[in-house]
Image (spheres, grey):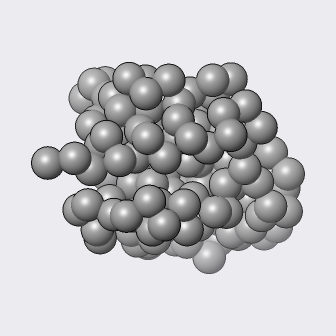
Amino acid sequence: MKQIVPLHINGDIHEVAIEPGATLLRVLREHLGLIGTKRGCDSGGCGCCTVHLDGKAVYSCMTFALQVAGRKITTIEGLSPDGRLNRLQDAFVEAGAVQCGYCTCGMIMAAQQLLDVTQTPTEEEIRRAIAGNLCRCTGYHKIVAAIKLASAP
């Protein structure tokens, strides 16, 4: 039986009828049309479904939607609410770190959490922050370069 739950997503409250086993990923994509969060492995192994939950990067495929009622959720769409790319997103484009684009949203969400707590991270800190996100196109060099570019004063 579905439950109507208030979800605080990208600064707005959405009343959503959710099935007990529905993941946050499913609700974001299928109920709310927020398709920037990608579906990959459905097991927390690729990171393309990364969102922020109360400011912390989490895999939305491993998070039950009913468990996040009342908590602050930010998706990739929430990083640029006015339709303009933020500094990190611009840096990904400038550094050529987008390639096929499938991992990009999750990579940006993981990197954004790092930049929210560390203004000028080291390369080691960057690599550790994105370690839970897989990319098969770039070899990570351009992604690390983009994050460094975004963190430059």
For residue 90, side relative to residue 153 (left or right): right
Q: Say if 120 sits above or below 69 in the image.
A: above
What is the x, y in percent for residue 70?
A: 44, 72
The residue nearer to you, when weighing 54 against 15, is 54
Which residue appears at 82% of the width and 67% of the height? 21
What is the x, y in percent for residue 38?
A: 69, 40
Q: Say if 88 sits above or below 4 in the image.
A: above
From where the camera sits, is residue 111 visible?
yes
Which residue appears at 76% of the width and 54% of the height? 46
Which residue appears at 48% of the width and 66% of the height? 124
The residue furthest left is: 153
From where the camera sits, is residue 8 visible?
no
What is the x, y in percent for residue 12?
A: 35, 49
Quarter of the image with the N terminus in it: bottom right
Q: Say if 129 sits above or below 87 in the image.
A: below
For residue 59, side relative to residue 10 (left or right): right
For residue 81, side relative to residue 100 (left or right): left
The residue nearer to you, when weighing 149 against 8, is 149
The residue nearer to you, when weighing 13 against 89, is 89
Which residue appears at 28% of the width and 36% of the height? 86
In terms of image quadrants, where is residue 114? bottom left
What is the x, y in percent for residue 6?
A: 48, 62
The residue furthest bottom is: 67
How many marks the image carries: the answer is: 0
